[in-house]
Image (cartoon, rainbow, N blue to C red):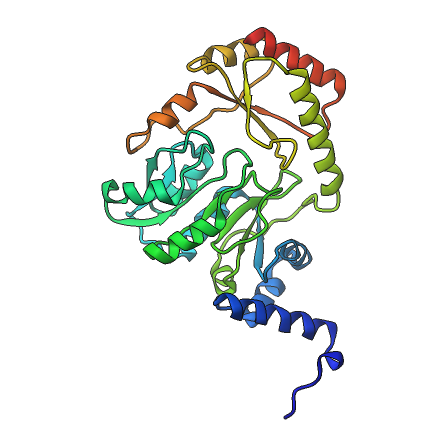
């Protein structure tokens, strides 16, 4: 049968042909039947489809009820064997470690870069030989909303053959591609989604579906308010002895406000802020099996993480900045 000219193809057919061409050029396998099955079988196919549309390349997506269930299911779908070791960065959250344990794995913490606050393939390559065997998976995380290098992790997965699942729960603003499976939080603050360019991976995912308000419709306005509030806060704290994450509030946003303070001062500053009614989030997961982690140990005592939201008004930001200055 002679192929139809492009002008005769339906919009849906042209979109699929374009997607297939993109994947063929990238050498990535894609099962569009599996994608359709995934989008049809979930409880919120409309949401899954909307989330998939935000990615540059054809990507399968599944919205899941919560972070721990999503990461656990993703590790299981990766084929990990119970009892093995999962490598995670030393600043991984308690939720990340809970998911690793729920998948039947033992977490082994590796130190992070002092500037990005994440670990990278170059450093991890040097430490793989020190990890307790058997290594079953790697779970990189985003640093409080800052983007990990997804391309580098995809290359590292091809190099090592190890399953890699990125926990970027705080990274809705920055995750735009999924060459390896990635967990991303929904902007409403409820639920997450799992994304992967491998549709068969999403088809294998067994996790409770997300039901509720995802916050997609209001994201553009929420993002603008987050950025505006963050920039105001940065202005209010000009000259204060703190360091903001590079680009926070300008090139990217998140609902976590994380700053570095004088080395070793974080516990004291956090206690003073608590006395003024401002609770801080813990940085780092506490004592678990780990490699030598001097950078992460220092950061845990020198970094503060505070809740941050889009509806902070000028008066509230003034009070928050004043409280931080007093605590410092």
- Residue 107 sits above or below residue 314 on the image: below
Which residue lies at the image location 42% right of the left edge and 18% below the top edge?
Answer: 301
**Considering depth in this image, is 42 or 276 the residue closer to the camera?**
276
Q: Residue furthest front?
A: 239
Q: Quadrant of residue 230?
A: top right
- Residue 165 sits above or below residue 22 on the image: above
Q: Is residue 18 visible?
A: yes
- Residue 126 sits above or below residue 247 on the image: below
Q: Position of residue 53 (x, y in %)?
A: 66, 57
Q: Is residue 73 visible?
A: no
Which residue lies at the image location 63% right of the left edge and 70% below the top edge?
Answer: 18
Q: Residue furthest top?
A: 326
> What quarter of the picture does the N terminus occupy?
bottom right
Q: Quadrant of residue 290?
A: top left
Could you tell me how many numbered marks the image carries? 0
Which residue lies at the image location 52% right of the left edge and 71% below the top edge?
Answer: 24
Q: Position of residue 233 (x, y in %)?
A: 67, 21
Q: Position of residue 143 (x, y in %)?
A: 50, 35
Q: Position of residue 275 (x, y in %)?
A: 56, 8
Q: Is residue 132 left or right of residue 245?
A: left
> What quarter of the picture does the C terminus occupy?
top right
Which residue lies at the image location 65% right of the left edge and 56% below the top edge?
Answer: 44
């Amino acid at each position: 049968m002679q192929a139809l000219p492009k002008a005769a193809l339906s919009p849906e057919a042209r979109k699929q042909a374009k997607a297939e061409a993109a994947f063929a050029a990238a050498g990535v396998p894609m099962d569009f039947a599996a994608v359709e099955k995934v989008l049809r079988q979930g409880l919120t196919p409309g949401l899954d489809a909307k989330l998939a549309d935000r990615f540059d390349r054809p990507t399968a997506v599944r919205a899941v009820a919560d972070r721990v269930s999503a990461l656990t299911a993703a590790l299981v779908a990766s084929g990990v064997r119970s009892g093995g070791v999962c490598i995670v960065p030393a600043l991984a959250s308690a939720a990340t470690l809970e998911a690793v344990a729920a998948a039947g794995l033992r977490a082994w913490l590796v130190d992070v870069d002092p500037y990005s606050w994440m670990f990278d393939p170059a450093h991890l390559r040097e430490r793989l030989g020190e990890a307790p065997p058997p290594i079953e998976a790697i779970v990189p995380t985003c640093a409080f909303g800052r983007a990990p290098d997804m391309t580098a992790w995809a290359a590292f997965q091809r190099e090592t053959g190890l399953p890699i699942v990125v926990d970027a729960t705080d990274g809705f603003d920055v995750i735009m591609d999924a060459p390896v499976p990635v967990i991303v939080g929904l902007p409403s603050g409820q639920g997450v989604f799992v994304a992967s360019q491998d549709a068969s991976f999403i088809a294998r995912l067994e996790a409770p579906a997300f039901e509720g308000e995802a916050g997609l419709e209001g994201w553009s306005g929420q993002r603008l308010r987050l950025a505006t509030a963050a920039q105001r806060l940065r202005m209010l704290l000009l000259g204060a002895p703190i360091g903001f994450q590079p680009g926070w509030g300008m090139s990217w946003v998140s609902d976590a406000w994380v700053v570095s303070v004088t080395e070793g001062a974080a516990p004291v500053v956090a206690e003073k802020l608590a006395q003024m009614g401002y609770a801080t989030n813990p940085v780092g997961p506490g004592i678990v099996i780990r490699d030598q982690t001097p950078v992460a140990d220092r950061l845990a005592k020198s970094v503060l993480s505070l809740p941050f939201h889009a509806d902070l008004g000028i008066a509230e930001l003034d009070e928050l900045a004043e409280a931080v200055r007093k605590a410092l």
